[in-house]
């Protein structure tokens, strides 16, 4: 089995607490119609069985579209559901153990919260890094000092891996994040809390695509 090709440009991280009581499957279904390219299932307050059931439901939505389902932290859930990958933080299972368990064909993302971690990640055969957080956010409170746009620029000059930026990103600042060098944006409330997830995703996709196209034109020119 070959590793599924992935596109970091618009990466949705789920959060049921920010979904206004709506079904997360429905939000994801609408979001991918709007242009989401990757989905990370993040669950902190449910049982393992509930987590697995959610993952299996999302796989039914995403697999026909070749959109990877990434499981946050829980390698056991990723294995049980044959999801496309796992995203881990600095305090989660060490990378080499995750890779040994998942195999070469699965996607592994790693959060980085300072420049030392970025440099350490360069020696790991991960698939992407998550720059966290870019801006201040209430979604995750256990992260380090925000990198800001200048931090993204520093990271992209040092990192050998593609990077998705997360933390306080929305329709107003998405373009500046891509201009700073990130390969994509990861959002939570910008889609999960939006009245219309499809329209929110579409608006973000258009912004990101415009900036990535500009970058490609400059590089080709």
Image (cartoon, helix red, strand yellow):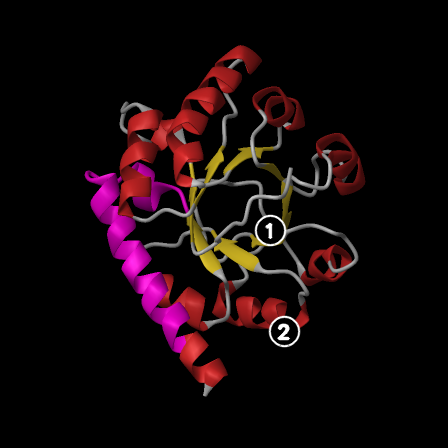
Between marks 2 and 1, how big is the CA–CA gap?
20 Å
94 to the left or right of 19: right
x and y, in percent, of residue 68 in the image: 49, 40
Q: Quadrant of residue 215?
A: bottom left
Horizontal placement of 176 versus 198: left or right? right
Q: Which residue is mark 2?
A: 157
Q: Main secondary structure of the magenta part?
A: helix
Closer to the N terminus: mark 2 or mark 1? 1
Q: Position of residue 146 (x, y in %)?
A: 53, 57
State which mark lies toward you, 2 or 1. Answer: 2
Q: Is residue 15 positioned above or below 140 on the image?
A: above
Residue at the bottom extreme of this rendering: 221
- Mark 2: which secondary structure? helix
Task: Judge left or right: residue 168 versus residue 127.
Answer: left
Is residue 49 in the magenta section?
no
Mark 1 surroundings: few (<14), some (14-19) or many (≥20) residues within 10 A: some
Check residue 201 for magenta coloring: yes
Residue 29 at least partly seen: yes
Residue 60 drawn at (x, y percent)? 41, 25
Residue pointed to by mark 1 = 144
Residue at point 37%, 28% (across, down): 17
Q: Which residues are magenta?
A: 187-214
- Looking at the image, which is closer to me, 4 or 181? 4
**Image quadrant where one finds the C terminus:** bottom left
* Quadrant of image for the N terminus: top right
Outermost residue on the front side: it is: 1
């Amino acid at each position: 089995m070959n590793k599924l090709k992935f596109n970091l440009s618009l990466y949705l991280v789920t959060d049921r607490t920010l979904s206004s009581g709506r079904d997360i499957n429905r939000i994801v279904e609408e979001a991918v119609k709007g242009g989401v390219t990757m989905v990370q299932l993040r669950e902190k307050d449910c049982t393992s069985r509930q987590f697995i059931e959610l993952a299996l439901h999302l796989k039914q939505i995403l697999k026909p579209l070749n959109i990877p389902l990434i499981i946050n932290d829980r390698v056991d859930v990723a294995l049980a559901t044959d999801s496309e990958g796992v995203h881990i933080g600095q305090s989660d299972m060490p990378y080499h153990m995750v890779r040994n368990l998942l195999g070469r064909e699965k996607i592994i993302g790693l959060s980085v919260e300072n420049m030392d971690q970025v440099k350490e990640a360069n020696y790991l055969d991960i698939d992407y890094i998550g720059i966290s957080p870019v801006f201040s956010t209430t979604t995750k409170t256990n992260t380090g000092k925000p990198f800001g746009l200048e931090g993204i620029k520093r990271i992209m000059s040092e990192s050998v891996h593609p990077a998705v930026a997360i933390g306080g990103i929305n329709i107003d600042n998405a373009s500046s994040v891509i201009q700073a060098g990130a390969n994509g944006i990861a959002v939570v409330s910008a889609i999960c809390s939006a009245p219309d997830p499809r329209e929110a995703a579409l608006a973000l996709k258009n912004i990101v695509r415009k900036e990535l196209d500009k970058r490609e034109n400059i590089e080709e020119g």
